[in-house]
Image: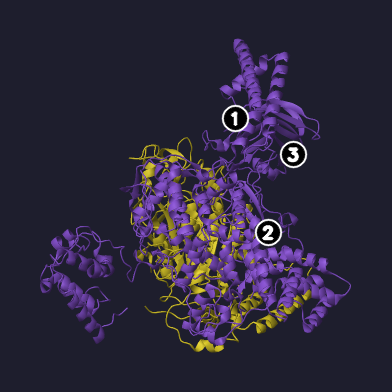
Amino acid sequence: MQRSRSPIFLTLALCFTADVAHADTAEEQAHFFRKHVEPILVGRCLECHGSDRIGEFDLRTQTAAIEEGGESGTCIEPGSPDESLLYEYVSNEQMPPEDPLSADEIATLKRWIADGAFFPSEPLDPFQVTTSRRAGLDWWSLQPLSSAPPPSPKGLPETWSQNPIDRFVYAKLSEKELQQSSPADPRTLIRRITYDITGLPPTPKEVASFLSTCDAETDSPNQVGDQAYEALVNRLLASPRYGEHWGRHWLDVVRFGESRGFERNEIVNNVWPFRDYVIRSLNQDKPFDQMAREHLAGDIVGKGNPEVEIGVAFIVCGPYDDVGNQDVLQIAQIRANTIDEMIRATGETFLGLTIGCARCHDHKFDPVKQQDYYRLYSTFAGVFHGNRVVATEDQRRELAKKKRPLDQTLQKASDQKKKLEATILALGEQSADKIESTWRRPPVDRKLTVENFAPVEARFLRLVSEGIEKNPHATAGYHIDEFEVWTAGESPRNIALASAGSTAEGKSRVPNDFSDAYSASLTIDGQFGARWLAAAPTLTITLPKTEQISRVVFSSDRPGAAGVSEVAGFVCEYRIEISADGENWTKVADSHDRLPLNENHRRRRLAEAVITADQQQQLASLNAKISRTKSELAKLQQLPSWSVGTYRQDNGPFHIFLGGNPQRKGELVTPASLSTLSKTVRPFRLAQDAPESKRRHALANWIVDLDNPLTPRVLANRLWHYHFGTGIVDTPSDFGFMGGRPTHPELLDWLARQIHTDLWRVKPLHKIILMSQTYRQSSDFHDHSASVDQQARFLWRFPPRRLSAEEIRDSMLQVAGKLNFEIGGPGFRLYHYWQDNVATYTPREKVGPETYRRSVYHQNARAAPVDLMAEYDTPDCAFSSPRRTVTTTPLQALTLMNHSFTIDMAETLAKSVKQDDLDATVRQVYLRVFSRPCDEQELASASLFIKEYGLNAFCRALFNANEFVYID
Amino acid sequence: MQTHRPTSNSQLLNHVVSRRGFLGNVSSGMAGIGLAHLLSNELGAQQTDWREGCGMTHHQPKAKRVLQIFCPGAASHIDLWEHKPALEKYDGKPLPGEEGVRSFQGKNGPLMMSPWPFKPAGQSGKMISTMLPYMAKHADDIAFIHSMTSKTNTHGPGCVFMNTGEDIEGFPSAGSWMSYALGTANENLPAYVAIPDIRGEPPNGKATWSNGYLPAQHQAIVLSNQQSIRNLQVPAGISAREEIATREFLQTLNHKHRLANPGNSELQARIAAYELAARMQLSAPEVSNLAAESESSHRFYGTDDSNKLKAAYARNCLLARRLLERGVRYVSLYCASRASGVDGLLNWDAHKTLKPDYERHCPVFDQPTAALLTDLKQRGMLEDTLVLWTTEFGRMPTRQEGTTGRDHNPDGFTCWMMGAGIRSGVSYGSTDEFGRRAASNPTTVWDFYATVLHLLGFDHERLTYYHNGLDRRLTSVHGNRIQEILA
């Protein structure tokens, strides 16, 4: 940007310098510096000359600026501008490079040096003023809310003078020489507002009723009656569908997701109460300041009240890395990443500030210091992801009362069992010598276990587990890498090979995405790399024909590569059986005369050898009692445990992490407010050992302080964004330098103040917006207006928009008469989920009535796009999504044309409207799908098409029509 | 800086449409060509600034398309590509200075030599593991980067990092960036295809080929020999005749609606998207039809191998070539899948038993990959196809305590490039004598992608997209291109 050097400016500059020529006293000099010099130094110089990089000129402090200077010595000679390098450089336009100072700025600096180059004792703050490259503390969004009254522009029509919003909008339209549009007709308006407030189309009955009340009121067709419309607005805002639709918006903003993300991405089944809380709170029109407090400190403000306490799940409903890591550096880094996620979510959601950008260094674009970031870090330092019981005191007491006797019974039975087992074992130990003398063979060996037996004819052979390596009482969960069956006689052959025609059967662990991964066939493939992982005790080999056999050989780690690792956990106690018919089995070998593999197995053997029938019975009855009591305990109504996070007191000390690296600790910080708003909102600062909960509560209070201008501005803008498709600021979570600038700054502040006036309730503001003429305009296109303002940011018309993925899906369900309006509770899934170490999500091909609920109740998992939703831009909940992209792609067409959901809904709609009279049927479909009657031409072409291809095909086409997915 | 213009009018048109705001804030994606007749005179407007999505680049590109082979699970650098004689010499001795160090899964034992010898390969005599006899034949064409480093030692974040330049989810993968930067080269096929392994998705699954915050048309289309494009098929029970008539009826409705609603070009874009979808339904099955390949070609890749995993991967290699040939700009080909939590069976994550694990994985990978590279070379496609071989990090030179496997090592590993614009037969950077840490020329994922973008004709610092407060890049705020591996 080239600064003006016109003669007029020069004259002004001269007058200006004359005015300040006599800055003699220290006080006057200080005033002159603050008012005129500092903005230049901070705004134009500190970007480069504001650090202690070696050899570079640092302009921040008196010592550095005046006394030390730069590489070439001092740069400022107080009293002598002409001997000052600084003046030379700015006056010959060498500095600032590419964008020289204006003449009056140069004159100011000259005067300042001539007067003695006063410099204050405290360092200059580079964040004081906004420059061409960054925002300072004087940035528009950080200033107090303006109280500018609604304007009265010239030519303001009577209808546009009632609602303050209209006066602001009209003034801007006039300024841009744009013309507002005529009012929308009743049919368009009811479709628009019904979608806007509920996310659903109006039913034909609702349309008819609105039209007839409008007619009665206005006595003319196609005109909206004010009273009829107000009644409509009131009805919609009171509808429970409002909370569902606007709750979905809020869930986007707070990056609500129901899986943990990262590598394991396990589904979270106990955070849906937060979704219900959001919907409930919106429907109740809970004041937003209260909601914010509940989001950040619900455990404090809602203690003992689960419906409120759940709000605090906000902090922990983002993604986090729970894979577990033993590397200490990585553990610290992962923890820092986890807290970073909480900081970003909080800053963007409530303040529209991208605080996360100050993690490694001061924010490059906004006045957020690295200290500010770590103040929030210390605020959240005690928050951890995880489940916690959220219950009332009564619930807790009641459960404890029911549990106590059962716990006692269980304890008693367990003690008795332990005692009995000890008695039996002692007995066994007494005759250990005798018993052990029967164990003559070496223990089983993972690398090679061999059983020889007298030659016997067999067609079938099986290994039956009686105990595995790590647990004598478990019979499944062992591995076999190869199992061989050798023929008897001179030249023995292994006939248990798939290549020889054998088969192996045995239940195995089955991952859904690779079902053969651990299958029993791996035991007879002639290779040792992969293993059968037994999910049941038995492995059965079917030989190609009956043969004489005399030996089996098996192992779990033939190459001996696994060491003692559990990847090759082996079978320990077993028997080998053969059969001619696969039904009658004969034992040919077992492990009972081998040495036990370990002490646990030894004890089991001893006990089994000496136990009496009476003891056996006692043990059985104790076991029965224990399992009965456990199942009774399990049947008790457990207290709800929700994913709301856990909190631990962390007394620091808390440091800045230099460069964002937890290993490089910088200066100390404590939980405190952001310096960003220090000029506007009363700051707070807590001690490093302040109670954990108090930190979050203090932050919440600061966020909703009536002097904090960001919170109500950001909130008002979000409402505007969802009503009109684009916010007054088009980056709803970024009110900083990189974000958009407000198209209607005064209107934004008026709306923000209105939120304060309504004591943080938002339904009244919705109503003001909805009642405005601005909102009630038609979306008719005008070439001229479009050439000035293509996107109608100044609202010369109501901007048409495409429905969201949720709206499209919910509308299809509603139109087909299948939408289940059940509110709340665990969500439904449009994907298959399975977990095998990590989680996998695959979209379902076929979805049934169990999924026919509103889309807000879909259990949205991270990194798990589902075609029906993601194709139409439902965002991945990895981040906050303050606005959705709207894309148009061929994949959308494929999904909406071919997914079984479309086919099912088309068929259902067809069934529900079908009548003998084809014309009446067509009319009914039009009313339901497009909320309007069809004309005669449409009727004719539809009838022709249906006669040839059927009603289903017609309904399928309509669900894909532009008219269905766009609203005006 | 010089800007290079696209060659195809439809690409330019596509772009003009969205830039001029005819689509408002709607991205037209592959839909723009349907607007040709409406906007022909828009082409008159000469543009000199670079604009995304229309085939324009910042400078003359060397590569027109990318094949990224990804071996998830952290394929061991010191057992495949980087020979470490010191491991043989000090096998069983402690790792100096880091005795018993704790890494991802815990404590480490002593140094462990690779279970297989290395042999000199090609003219250059590059030492390659004898487990990769087929790949060794390509040694002279490859530029190895032996000094890669990662931010994380965890598979999921590591795979996401290696694909998106960020270790948390939600960011666009390199393929999505390429789709965003250039648009599509073949309007009937997607710009970016991900081919998962038959064993399943890689760690963090779909996040590794995500479009992140870029508009949805830049997502990878998931397609493999075992899995066709979702919703591509006309539903059962709908005849071809009915399908055509339904589409025609729909377009009649849409045209009428559009005439009644002038000035909303989204409506036209959506009409075009339906036309394009119909064309995709024809071209996608053609590209996936491996039966069209010769028998010798199948044998060469190994699609008929008795090892089912190898045969499946070989078919995906063949599919990759067909996609690249037909103008898909970015193909991500996966060899192996997620962590099983049981053993090193599903991917290259050999914690417990390196030898048997890799004796399973190497044969799956070796012949088919080498065949694909040979095939690309013989067809002259390596001239303008950039091949990347990547994995999320390396493995420790030590054995994991009590096992014969290796734990995760983010401090040093190997990736390589070959083909368009790449210097053949070089080895850039190295780890220390044991393979523990990048020692000479440590290289980041951002350096890697700065180089990739450079070859594609882009200055990585200027290819940006605004999201939540920043003009974001594939290379975050880092990255220097690796001059030494450029031809």
Q: Residue type at mark 3: give it.
A: Thr
Q: Nearer the viewer, mark 2 or mark 1?
A: 2
Quarter of the image holding residue B445?
Answer: bottom left
Quadrant of image for the N terminus of chain B: bottom left
Q: Position of residue A768 (x, y in %)?
A: 57, 68
Q: Residue at x 50, y 67 (%)?
A: A751
Badge 1 marks a residue whose secondary structure is loop
Letter of the purple chain: A
Letter of the chain that mark 2 sits on in the rendering: A
Residue occupied by mark 1: A469
Residue occupied by mark 2: A854
Question: How far apart are the two marked residues, 2 and 3, measured between alpha carbons?
Answer: 53 Å
Mark 3, other Cα within 10 Å: few <14 / some 14–19 / many ≥20: many
Q: Residue type at mark 2: give it.
A: Arg
Q: If you read the primary sequence from the N terminus, does the residue marked by circle 3 or circle 1 appear first?
A: 1
Letter of the chain that mark 3 sits on in the rendering: A
Residue occupied by mark 3: A542
Q: CB atoms at circles 2 and 1 under 8 Å apart? A: no
Q: Residue type at mark 1: give it.
A: Glu
Q: If you read the primary sequence from the N terminus, does the residue marked by circle 2 or circle 3 appear first?
A: 3
Q: Position of residue B354 (x, y in %)?
A: 50, 43
Quarter of the image holding residue A361?
Answer: bottom left
Could you say which is closer to the camera, residue A234 or residue A66? A234
Mark 2, other Cα within 10 Å: few <14 / some 14–19 / many ≥20: many
Query: Chain B drawn in what color?
Result: yellow
Q: If you read the primary sequence from the N terminus, does the residue marked by circle 2 or circle 1 appear first?
A: 1
Quadrant of image for the C terminus of chain B: bottom left
Q: Position of residue A887 (x, y in %)?
A: 58, 71
Could you say which is closer to the camera, residue A339 or residue A322? A339
Mark yes or no: residue A728 visible: yes
